[in-house]
Image: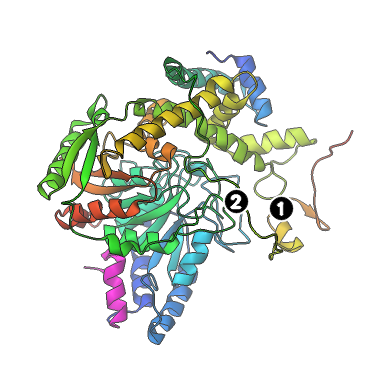
Amino acid sequence: MELYQKTAHQLHQMLRKKEVTSKEITRSVLDRIQAVEERIHSYITVLPELAMKQAEEADGRLQKGDAEPLTGIPVAIKDLICTQGVRTTCGSHILENFIPNYDATVTTKLKKSGAVFVGKANMDEFAMGSSTENSYFGPTRNPWDLERIPGGSSGGSAAAVAAGECILSLGSDTGGSIRQPAACCGIVGMKPTYGRVSRYGLVAFASSLDQIGPFARDVRDAALLLTAISGYEPRDSTSVNLKVPDYRESLVNDVRSLVLGVPREVFGEGIDPQVESAVREAIRTLEKLGAKIVEVSLPHSEYAVAVYYIIAPAEASSNLARYDGVKYGFRAKGARELMEMYRETRSQGFGAEVRRRIMLGTYALSAGYYEAYYRKASQVRTLIAKDFEKAFGQCDALIMPTTPTPAFKLGEKVDDPLQMYLSDIYTIPCNLAGLPGVSIPCGFSPSGLPIGLQILANHFQEEKILRVAYTYETNTDHHLRRPNLESE
Amino acid sequence: MKITKEEVEHVALLARLKFSEKEKERFVSQLNRILAYMDQLGKLDTSSVDPTFHAVSQKNIYREDTVLPSLNLKQTLANGPDVDRGFFRVPKIIE
């Protein structure tokens, strides 16, 4: 197996035994990028020089014996997480040349851990989308089928891990933007509890929903990266001051004492039969492994997409007001007065979906409509959160599909925003309630497209999720399959 | 609820956006489809339900009022699209 195909924990063992150097691993990943990037387009910016320099530093640490689990491991970072001195575009024309003067908290944490930054991953503009087709820099393709989308909005981060263009990556999840692309690309993607990871330096989309999380090839790697990025940070006052567990300790191959809930609503209308059969099979597997399976109900989850597409655009319309062509970013040329400059800058600088959501959000917050849309949605959000509260009174974790269908084709939904929004139907409720969730591979369609199993737990119970995910993974082999990019 | 072309124009002004006639028409039809979908929320009686603005609610987060390093002038202006003598330059504001 090539170095770029291995997991971080395998590479860590090899590094510690001096069987390999970080420079060799990083070279292997950079060569892989060279070989496949033209077809996949996982990256907006590749950082070969920075990566080799960090790899050399990591090798120095390894020599001295003070290596951490991520020291010397090549990582990709979604391009809305600030990296000092490295362009951070958010997938947008308006930030095409933006070079942050500071690091996000997660960037600082990864630098301290000795991780190697191979590149800034492609994404839907401002994380708005479910297919990565909304990137100003062009779409990312699914490594399992180049005609299909990798999911979104963290499609670049997911595709890079699946294609061997990095070992681990960071994404962000506002309505499913980590879990949905993880499902589409056949890897592990985790959204932590709201507040578990600091959002300082994460370019804001919808502040009450956004959360940074890991992508990895197995559950152990996801636990490593989650441990590295979690924790309270005073500059994000919504980050929560709770001790961070070492999530490796949750990797217990045993679900016998756990009760797993299956929401009866998820196998309704709109689910692809291939997804349904793979997820039902996964439920049976967990039952055979000793988990008790119970049926629960999330009666308000059918309203989640409507609630989300009011609240998220409303918050976005406010957050994105800062892009005014004055302090940073693109400014349209030729405007003679200020209002014209604002309107030209924003209309030329934002893509179609971002403008659509700003319009939707501004409308939902505007005089006369606030009560009917924003307030109403925020009330229904309470009902959705209460459904989960009730469900977690009956079970330890919920298991369900991540997406209603496997990855769809590029172009299939671009002209129909509502259809695109509905692809997030299983992932959105979790964000509205602030819960942690993971997607892990649980099978493949007959044509070889990955299918994801979603596991959710109550606030700050990432450990339960990891335990269920690890047990499932240890007893199955879906996570070992890799896309074949050599035959092209 | 139905959104009209005039409302699209008004909201575009509030949002500091600008659209061509063709784009406005497309927006009217797309936004109306999306808003029709949102209308299903009207089926729920929420008269006694408190709204949720933060799913993991915290109250009164205080910190010591200490001065920490911040960006200097050069760093602050580094990404400005039009910068002159330590200022951001913008088109004329006052008539």
The residue positioned farthest toward the right in the image shown: B95
Q: Which of A242 and A320 is in front in this view?
A: A242
The prevailing secondary structure element of the residues shown in magenta is: helix
Q: Relative to A458, say whether B6 is above or below.
A: above
The residue positioned farthest toward the left in the image shown: A288
- Magenta segment includes A116: no
Q: Which of A307 and A127 is in front in this view?
A: A307
Chain hosting mark 1:
B
Q: Can residue A150 be seen in this view?
A: no
Disc tally is 2
Position of residue A313 measured from the top left corner of the image (x, y, whole percent): 53, 33
Residue of label 1: B80
Q: Nearer the viewer, residue B46 or A50?
A: B46
Q: Relative to A15, say whether A203 is above or below.
A: above
Which mark, by number, is residue A185? Answer: none
- Magenta residues? A1-18
Amino acid type at circle 1 is: Gly
Q: In this view, does B2 lie to the left or right of A3?
A: right
For the residues marked 1 and 2, what is the alpha-carbon distance in whole angstroms?
33 Å
The residue positioned farthest toward the bottom in the image shown: A64
Q: Who's the residue at 49% across and 47% down the image?
A: A137
Q: What element carries label 1?
A: loop
Crowding around mark 2 (Cα neighbors within 10 Å: few <14, some 14 to 19, many 20+) is: few
Query: Cβ–Cβ below 8 Å for labels 1 and 2?
Result: no
Mark 1 or mark 2, which has the lower sequence index?
A: 2
Chain hosting mark 2:
B
Q: What element carries label 2?
A: loop
Amino acid type at circle 2 is: Ile
Residue of label 2: B61
